[in-house]
Amino acid sequence: MSTHDAVHEAPESEAPESGAPVRFDTKIAVLLREDLETWQRLNVTAFLVSGLGSQFPEIIGEPYEDADAVGYLPMFRQPVLVFEGTKETLTTAHARVLSRALPRALFTSDLFATGNDRDNRAAVRAVATADLDLVGLAVYGPKNAVDKVLKGARMHR
C-alpha cells in the first residue's frame, strides 16, 4: 500500500454561505522535539511540510491574488497544527505513524549539518529506522489517525 492510499480522501465539509468555518476530515500536523532552538523549529517545520504538498496536491488551495491583481503562490487549504514533545514522544509517534502507514516526513538531527537535498537523503539512509535521532515529524491523514499518532504530544507554545 502506498502512503497515498493510506489517506482516505473524504471531501472537506463545505461551509454554508453564512460564513461558518470549514471543517476538514484530515489533519496536517508537525511534531517537534521540545529542546530545539527557535531557528531550528522554524527550519524543521518548513522542511517537513514541503514534503506533504509535493505528494498530496489535493491539500493545496488556490493561488492568492491581492486587490492590485498581483499573484501569489497557493498554500495548504487547511491549517498546519504544530506540536512538541520529548525525544521519547517523537520515537513513539514515529512508530505509530509507521504502523498506520500514514504519509510522513522526518527530520533528524544529522540534517542540521548538511546543506543540500542529496546530503540530507544520504544522512537519513545511513541510519537504521530504530536509530534515527528524530527532531521533527510531519504527518497527514484522517483526523482520528493523526490524533492517535500524536497522543502524548502537546500543542507548540
Image: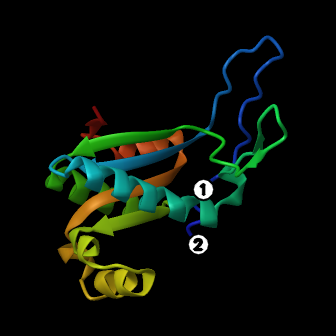
Secondary structure type for disc 1: loop
Q: Where 46 falls versus 123 (above or below)?
A: above
Q: Residue at x 30, y 79 (%)?
A: 114
Residue 70 visible in the current orientation: yes
> At label 2, which amino acid type do we have?
Ser
Mark 1 surroundings within 10 Å by alpha-carbon count, few (fewer than 14), some (14 through 19), many (20 or more) = some
Q: Position of residue 101 (x, y in %)?
A: 47, 64
Q: Where 87 falls versus 34 (above or below)?
A: below
Q: Residue at x 24, y 76 (%)?
A: 113
Marker disc for residue 7: 1
Q: Residue at x 49, y 56 (%)?
A: 49
Q: Position of residue 133 (x, y in %)?
A: 19, 69
Q: Where 81 falls versus 42 (above or below)?
A: above
Viewer-proximal residue, 66 or 50? 66
Residue 63 visible in the current orientation: no
Mark 2 surroundings within 10 Å by alpha-carbon count, few (fewer than 14), some (14 through 19), many (20 or more) = few
Q: Going by the picture, which residue comes out furthest to the front?
A: 68
Marker disc for residue 2: 2
Residue 111 sits in which quadrant?
Answer: bottom left
> At label 1, which amino acid type do we have?
Val
Say whether marks 2 and 1 touch (CB < 8 Å).
no
Q: Position of residue 56 (x, y in %)?
A: 65, 60
Q: Where 144 falls versus 128 (above or below)?
A: above
